Image (cartoon, rainbow, N blue to C red):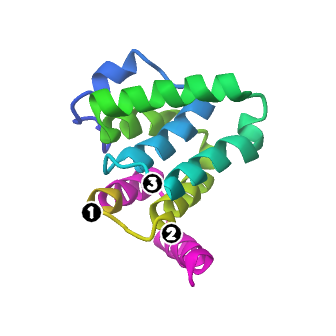
């Protein structure tokens, strides 16, 4: 049994399998939407992720808009944790460290780490099997990014 198997709504999401890019974006949307308040800084990290990565190179403005709509609808209807539970298994293995880094960036971007964000980030780290040493290094680098 996986870490997120018992979450309400996760079974319903099984019918809506996410592609690799949708899963990557879904993890970020879940983190951004965890506290129910998408800050300008979090939105900036999300938009930057979906416009600057090769993974989303074939996504034009309309495709990105549909992607945002799909993922935020899932998050709002079923919860950020359920979206993340569905997205993690579909996230390409070679992008797990990258999505964790972007998630940390998003959480730290607005200068406030809410308890629910901290909890989801911890669950994400565990589910993606990010080693402590690496996660600590990522957090320190992102903290330096926003220092001052």
| Residue drawn at x 34%, y 54% as measured from the top left | 120
- Which range is magenta? 119-148
Above or below 24: residue 109: below
Give the quadrant of the C terminus.
bottom right
The verdict on residue 143 being magenta is yes
- Spatial CA distance of label 1 from label 3 is 16 Å
Q: Earlier in the sequence, mark 2 or mark 1?
A: 1
Dots 1, 3 in contact, CB < 8 A: no
Which quadrant of the structure image shows residue 6? top left
- Which residue bears the numbered disc 2? 135
Q: Position of residue 76 (x, y in %)?
A: 32, 32
Q: Where is residue 32 in the image (x, y as percent from the top left)?
A: 43, 49
The verdict on residue 81 being magenta is no
Give the quadrant of the N terminus.
top left
- Which residue bears the numbered disc 1? 115
Q: Position of residue 22 (x, y in %)?
A: 56, 31
């Amino acid at each position: 049994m996986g870490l997120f198997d018992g979450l309400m709504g996760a079974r319903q999401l099984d019918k809506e399998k996410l592609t690799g890019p949708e899963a990557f974006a879904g993890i970020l949307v879940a983190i951004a939407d965890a506290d129910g308040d998408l800050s300008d800084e979090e939105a900036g990290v999300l938009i930057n992720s979906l416009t600057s990565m090769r993974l989303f190179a074939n996504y034009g403005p309309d495709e990105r808009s549909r992607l945002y709509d799909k993922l935020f609808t899932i998050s709002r209807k079923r919860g950020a944790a359920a979206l993340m539970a569905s997205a993690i298994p579909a996230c390409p293995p070679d992008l797990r460290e990258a999505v964790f880094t972007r998630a940390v960036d998003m959480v730290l971007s607005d200068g406030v780490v809410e308890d629910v964000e901290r909890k989801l980030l911890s669950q994400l780290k565990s589910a993606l099997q990010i080693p402590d040493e690496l996660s600590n290094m990522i957090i320190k680098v992102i903290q330096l990014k926003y220092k001052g």
